Image (cartoon, coloured by chain):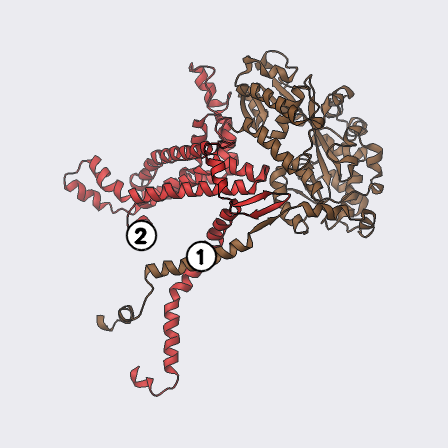
Amino acid sequence: MTAAAGAVPGVRGGMRRRRWARMSVPYLLALVGSAWMVILFLIPLISGLTVSLMTGDVEQGYTLTWNFGIYGELFGPGADVPYTLFLGRALLYGATATLLTIAVGYPMAYYVAFRVRPRWKTPLLSLVLVSFLVSFIIRTDMWAFLLGGQGPLLSLLHRLGVGADFHILGTPAAVIGGLAYNSLPFMVLPIYVALERIDPRLFEAASDLYASPRSVFLRTTLPLSRSGIFSGILLVFIDCAGDPVNAQLLGGKSTYLIGQAIQDTYLTQQSYNVAAALSTVLMIALGVILFAYARVFGTDNIEDLV
Amino acid sequence: MSPENDPALRRGLTQARLSRRGLLRGAGALGGAAALSALLAACSIPGTDRNAAAADAIDWTRWWAAKRKAGVLDFANWPLYIDQDDKGNSESLTRFTAATGIAVSYKEVIQDDPSFYAKIAPLLRAQQSTGYDLMVITNGWQLTELIDNGWLAQLDHTQLPNFAKYADTSVLFPAYDPGNLHTTVWQTGFSGIAYNERLTGGPITSWDDLLHPRFRGKIGMFSDNTEYGNAALLAVGVEPTKATRDDWKKALRWLERLQPNVAKFYDQGYTDALQNGDIWISQAWSGDVYQVQAGGHDEIRFVTPEEGQTMWHDAMCIPITARHPVDALAWMNYYYQPETAGLVEDYVNYVCPVPAAKDYILNTIGDAPVANSPLVFPTPQTLAKSHEMYVYRDYADYAAWNAMFDPIAQA
């Protein structure tokens, strides 16, 4: 290289160009991803925030007046509509549903990862996903039928002597159950992926070191599958906390959630600033909760979580 | 290759690289720029007031004279809202095409008024075509908005002789569109009371019956505040179209008394809930109850309450930006013949706007249950007890209504 460099004019420029090309590769590769983030995340986020600070109505139009007071009006002590309650309720239902999916999904994923023959794994995982072949709304509506007053479940319970006033539909339990049911695959799959990656020889090693089956699970399996639980929680909790559909179809008159409030203020009341403020607050609340959670239970190294 | 000659290592040791901090700073600057541009782009959302004045200034006779028949009609309607055979073909549309040479592209795209309005409003605001020449919108805030914003074409009634000849008086002179200037009715429906006779153990005859403590947690109401607000106005003896703010307050107090009895505010699914016993009594649409009864559930009854029931209209209208308005007008006129209205009505079973269709359904189609149903062709006594709903004067009026009645359903 050094021998030829002096002989051919223009080579230094060529080298610089090549170096630039080499250096820019990672940024070019990241271009699509960054554009995605900017167009579909950052701009909507900023414009949502901006709209929330506007005042006006659909007839007069909305203008940006930096009306930060709206957050106090909606969530402060003197609020006309108890949005804080709707938000708190949504976070509570979402968290409960997430715990429920872990309780149900972890054993499922564990069973498929370790307790079945390899040729059964794909069919069993497909079974987890098969419910996605039916529309989300129809699946939820079928639960309304199953849990209904004279549906199969309550008929059975009434025959077994449960009081005639007992009902499931319209209660928080029905909404939480619906949320958990609809997002179960989002918990099972990441946990399965995490479990599948664990080298089974680690269990043998743990047993060789006189660990009981219980401590093998608690000190080896569970910590190594933490990344799966973490991604599962992200997918399920965010989804559940903003969902308006389950509460609409399975809930009653005291299960109104922030997701429904956002939908109603935007589509029905056409108060764009209120709808934007509500979604901003929901997003911030989710962000703070998940950040705190990642700090406390997550790892320092983000790669451990992927 | 020895380690010290590895070009990657050499590069790493000698060339300046972006630190994570630097990268974040760069990303921050880029994001900031993007944010700023988004901010500038979204600094205001234009209002709709100025469009209204523009539409009033249009000379509609000349507007229609300048339009030509295109032979195409894009028709937006609700699901299951026209006659259809098993293959999805509509006899009424086929006959229309044969008679006029206008090919119809029929789309079932309207699930509810607010979300359909949200889809078309940005296009109409930008004076662009929505892709539809004819759409069916329920009389309510969104229809009032479409009219007030000047987004609907004023109809050329000289091209609607069948409407003048066959339309029932109940669909003429509507409060929401005086003089049928912008709309003609596709279907009417009654919002009355449905109940499961096996569970209530006796007839329900009035809105006030719903207040009985026996029905605690057994009542369903619609989640739409226009529906339960107007029902409550009737319950306290107020004519909804003439209601004042004080009347609203009376209605609100009635709803507050009713609330402990309400199990749920329904968008849909109340007929299933009535059949399976989740609720015993519900605010109900006549057409839904007709379908349930036709399905063999005689225990579900529909009643026009003593205090009266509200009447809603799904209205056909033509967006001002429609590409084929003449074709849309031709369909409106064609629909108002007894034969066409009869074909549609025999399938749809709400309230027919063309009384003469009854003979056609009875004698030509031969479907006596539909023709003789008081839910499809109501008696004059029923019509006398059916009231138009309150018409919102403007957005502020609508916002005040929401502020008053929303807390009932949003507990």
- Considering depth in this image, is A61 or B159 the residue closer to the camera? A61
For disc 2, the marked residue is A303
Helix, strand or loop at mark 1: helix
Vertical arrangement, residue A32 with respect to residue A228, above or below? below
Chain A tint in image: red
Q: Say if A236 sits above or below B71 in the image.
A: above
**Amino acid tagged 1:** Gly
The chain in brown: B
The location of residue B370, given as percent across then percent down, is 73, 25
Work out whether residue A81 can be spotted.
Answer: yes
Q: Check disc 2 and report its element: helix, strand or loop.
A: helix
Asked which quadrant contains residue A286, the reply is top left
Instruction: Report in which chain the residue with disc 2 lies.
Output: A
Label disc, if present, on residue A134 of the rendered structure: none
Q: List x then y, in percent, for residue A277.
A: 49, 42
Tell me if mark 2 has few (under 14), some (14-19) or many (20+) residues whose alpha carbon lies within 10 angstroms of its own: few
**Mark 1 residue crowding within 10 angstroms, few (<14) / some (14–19) / many (20+):** some
Q: Is residue B347 above or below residue A151?
A: below
Amino acid type indicated by mark 2: Glu
Q: Tally the marks.
A: 2
Dot 1: chain letter: B
Q: Residue at x 59, y 21 (%)?
A: B253
* Residue B267 visible in image: no
| Closer to the eye: label 2 or 1 | 1
Q: Which mark is residue B31?
A: 1
State the image quarter where residue B226 is shown.
Answer: top right
Query: Is A278 placed left or right of B293 in the picture?
Result: left
